Image (spheres, rainbow, N blue to C red):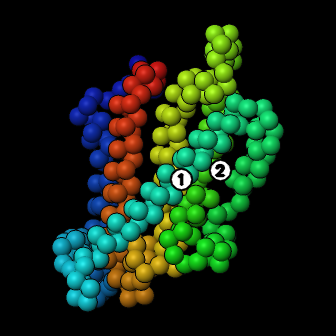
């Protein structure tokens, strides 16, 4: 039997999924032990127990000055910016992507412009955004929008172009207008793809958010990481990195579950 046709059983699949994480944790623990044995005051690789104690403290103990639990305050601030940017990006990408894919005039006028925008490095625009929009929330959300909207727009417009032409012909034969075709033929097939695009864009969205918070902010996950780096507080930095990774995983899982529940026909077609 060919290896490409062998499918692991459920217990084996779970074990294989856990194996890379176990190996990374083991490698870190060994590296930390070696460094701390050589230098007990080493800060580069804190012991796993130290990271755990720091995490418990960050999640439960309020700040002495503000009486706020800073990790939760940073989390809510960052998630608000992230969700705002992603929702705006998804809305713009859905409207423009549908127009480019469905309307020849829109395709002629906008496809080249969107293609050029997708080539602009968003982080290079960060100083301009701070000058134009200030150092507040707007510039951070706009960076996310500029960073992920062109990619999502191009992918959604291509998805519209990939819809079999026969579907449009049949709808128009039955008397459907362009608006009806957009709502009843294109939109149902585009929404699952939109969710997939959001999932694929979350990594970039987090990157742009953390970069913006690191440069100009007084609250947020990225701000806190870059604030404590000057003290070499690796236990705090690693706690925040692990927490961001966990948040990203949960958001991705929720979007995947939403897609599976809302569009079961997509799963059946895979």
In terms of depth relative to the viewer, which is nearer, 51 or 188? 188
Q: Residue at x 62, y 32 (%)?
A: 159
Q: Say which mark, if any, is on residue 150.
A: 2
Under circle 2, the secondary element is helix
* Most foreground residue, 243 or 104: 104
Q: Give the side of residue 178 with respect to residue 48, left or right.
A: right
Q: Earlier in the sequence, mark 2 or mark 1?
A: 1
Q: Residues within 10 Å of mark 1 (few under 14, many from 20)?
A: some
**Whole-percent x and y of residue 223?**
43, 77
Image location of residue 50, percent across then percent down: 22, 76
Residue 22 percent location from the top left of the image: 28, 54
Please name the residue shown 24% across and 76% down the image. 69
The residue at 49%/51% (across/down) is: 87
Name the spot of residue 13 as percent of width and height, x first: 30, 36
Q: Which mark is residue 104?
A: none
Say which residue label 1 marks: 88
Measure how far apart labels 2 and 1 are at the Cα level.
12 Å
């Amino acid at each position: 039997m060919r290896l490409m046709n062998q499918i692991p059983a459920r217990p084996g699949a779970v074990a294989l999924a856990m194996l890379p994480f176990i190996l990374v944790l083991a490698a870190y623990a060994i590296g930390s032990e070696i460094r701390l044995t050589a230098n007990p005051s080493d800060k580069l690789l804190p012991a796993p127990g130290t990271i755990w104690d720091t995490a418990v403290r960050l999640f439960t103990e309020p700040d002495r000055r503000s009486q706020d639990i800073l990790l939760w305050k940073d989390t809510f601030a960052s998630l608000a910016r992230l969700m705002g940017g992603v929702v705006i990006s998804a809305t713009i990408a859905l409207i423009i992507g549908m127009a480019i894919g469905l309307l020849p005039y829109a395709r002629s006028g906008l496809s080249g412009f969107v293609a050029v925008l997708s080539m602009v490095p968003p982080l290079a625009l960060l100083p301009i955004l701070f000058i134009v929009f200030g150092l507040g929330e707007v510039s951070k959300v706009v960076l996310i929008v500029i960073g992920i909207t062109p990619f999502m727009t191009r992918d959604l417009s291509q998805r519209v172009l990939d819809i079999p032409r026969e579907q449009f012909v049949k709808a128009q034969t039955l008397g459907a207008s362009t608006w009806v075709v957009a709502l009843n033929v294109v939109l149902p097939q585009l929404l699952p793809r939109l969710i997939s695009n959001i999932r694929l864009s979350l990594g970039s969205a987090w990157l742009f958010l953390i970069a913006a918070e690191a440069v100009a902010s007084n609250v947020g996950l990225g701000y806190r990481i870059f604030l404590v780096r000057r003290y070499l507080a690796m236990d705090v930095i690693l706690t925040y990195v692990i927490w961001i990774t966990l948040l990203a995983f949960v958001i991705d899982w929720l979007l995947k579950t939403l897609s599976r529940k809302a569009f079961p026909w997509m799963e059946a077609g895979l």
